[in-house]
Every structure is written in structure tokens, then in C-alpha cells.
């Protein structure tokens, strides 16, 4: 049993549907990061939690796992490449701690993938890029017939 005194469902929005979001690019921030041991116990991965910050899927969470400490060289190189893309996207090129990547906007590239064990469709973060900055509004020029000579 668990003590639930103090909880009132009237004051909390119910959890929504967790269907996968459509493949695409979404503006997001990293809200959490944690180094965790691999299932095999032979290394560690950095788990990043991304929160979409605008659009119809605002506040949805997605996760990425980077095998930064892994005996498999290929897995480690892929993870380092992904971390490099994330760092470049948020403008922190040499972080000392993953928390330095938190709350900085970047674009995550999301795809839909079928799980091999359940055939369930799930989301996967497969790329990262910088948030595009809006171009400055064009300066209003005076039409030639209104210019003073």
C-alpha cells in the first residue's frame, strides 16, 4: 500500500494519450539528463529527456539514449556524434556537465519506428539542429517618387 493522503485528482490534469507524435522536426529543450548503466552492465548511457516547447505537441516528452561509455566502438562513436550535434545545436561546444545543455532550444528530428518485439509504433529522436532565428524585418524603403533629392 501507498499513502496517498494529500492527493486530489480535482487539482491535477489527467494524463493524456501517449500515442506517438507524427514524424517531423520539433522545437524542444532538454529538461533532464542522467547517466545510467546499460542493461548488460558493461557501460553507461546518457539518457536525455526532451520537452517540445511549441506547437500542437507542446509539453510532450521524448527521450534519447547516448551510449557514451560502451565497449562497442561503433555505438560509442555514434553517441559521440549525436552529442556533438546536440552541443552544436544549443551552442555549448565543450560542456563539463550535461546540465549545461538543459533549457536551451534546439530542433529535434523525430521519426516513427516499429518496435521489433511488440510491433508497436514508437517515436525515436534521430537528429538535432539549431533553432532557426527569424530574419530581421526588411527595412522599409522610401519609394523613389517620395524621396527628396
Image (cartoon, helix red, strand yellow):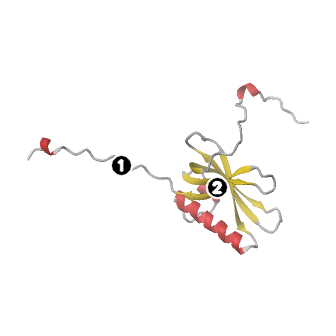
Q: Is residue 101 above or below residue 71?
A: above
Q: Position of residue 139 (x, y in %)?
A: 27, 47
Residue 68: quarter of image: bottom right
Disc 2: which residue: 125
SS state under label 2:
strand
Q: Is residue 85 above or below residue 138?
A: below
Give the mark nearest the N terminus, 1 or 2: 2
Q: Nearer the viewer, residue 142 or 115?
A: 115
For the residues marked 1 and 2, what is the alpha-carbon distance in whole angstroms? 30 Å
The residue furthest right is 1
Task: Report how many numbered discs are placed on residues in the image.
Answer: 2
Residue 53: quarter of image: top right
Q: Residue at x 71, y 65 (%)?
A: 67
Disc 1: which residue: 136
Q: Residues within 10 Å of mark 1 (few under 14, many from 20)?
A: few
Q: Residue at x 65, y 43 (%)?
A: 60
Asked if residue 138 lies left or right of residue 65, the reply is left
Q: Position of residue 148 (x, y in %)?
A: 10, 44
SS state under label 1:
loop
Q: Residue at x 67, y 49 (%)?
A: 62
Asked if residue 58 lies left or right of residue 113, the reply is left
Q: Residue at x 60, y 46 (%)?
A: 52
Q: Is residue 80 above or below residue 59?
A: below
Residue 74, label in figure: none
Q: Position of residue 7 (x, y in %)?
A: 78, 30
The residue furthest top is 10
Amino acid at each position: 500500500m501507498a499513502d496517498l493522503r494529500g492527493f486530489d485528482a480535482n487539482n491535477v490534469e489527467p494524463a493524456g494519450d501517449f500515442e506517438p507524435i507524427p514524424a517531423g522536426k520539433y522545437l524542444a529543450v532538454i529538461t533532464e539528463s542522467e547517466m545510467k548503466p546499460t542493461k548488460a552492465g558493461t557501460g553507461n548511457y546518457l539518457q536525455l529527456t526532451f520537452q517540445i516547447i511549441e506547437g500542437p505537441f507542446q509539453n510532450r516528452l521524448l527521450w534519447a539514449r547516448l551510449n557514451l561509455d560502451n565497449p562497442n566502438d561503433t555505438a560509442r562513436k555514434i553517441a559521440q556524434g549525436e552529442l556533438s550535434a546536440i552541443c552544436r545545436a544549443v551552442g555549448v561546444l565543450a560542456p563539463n556537465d550535461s546540465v549545461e545543455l538543459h533549457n536551451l532550444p534546439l530542433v529535434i528530428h523525430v521519426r516513427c519506428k516499429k518496435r521489433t518485439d511488440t510491433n508497436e509504433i514508437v517515436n525515436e529522436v534521430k537528429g538535432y539542429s539549431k533553432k532557426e532565428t527569424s530574419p530581421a524585418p526588411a527595412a522599409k524603403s522610401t519609394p523613389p517618387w517620395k524621396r527628396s533629392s
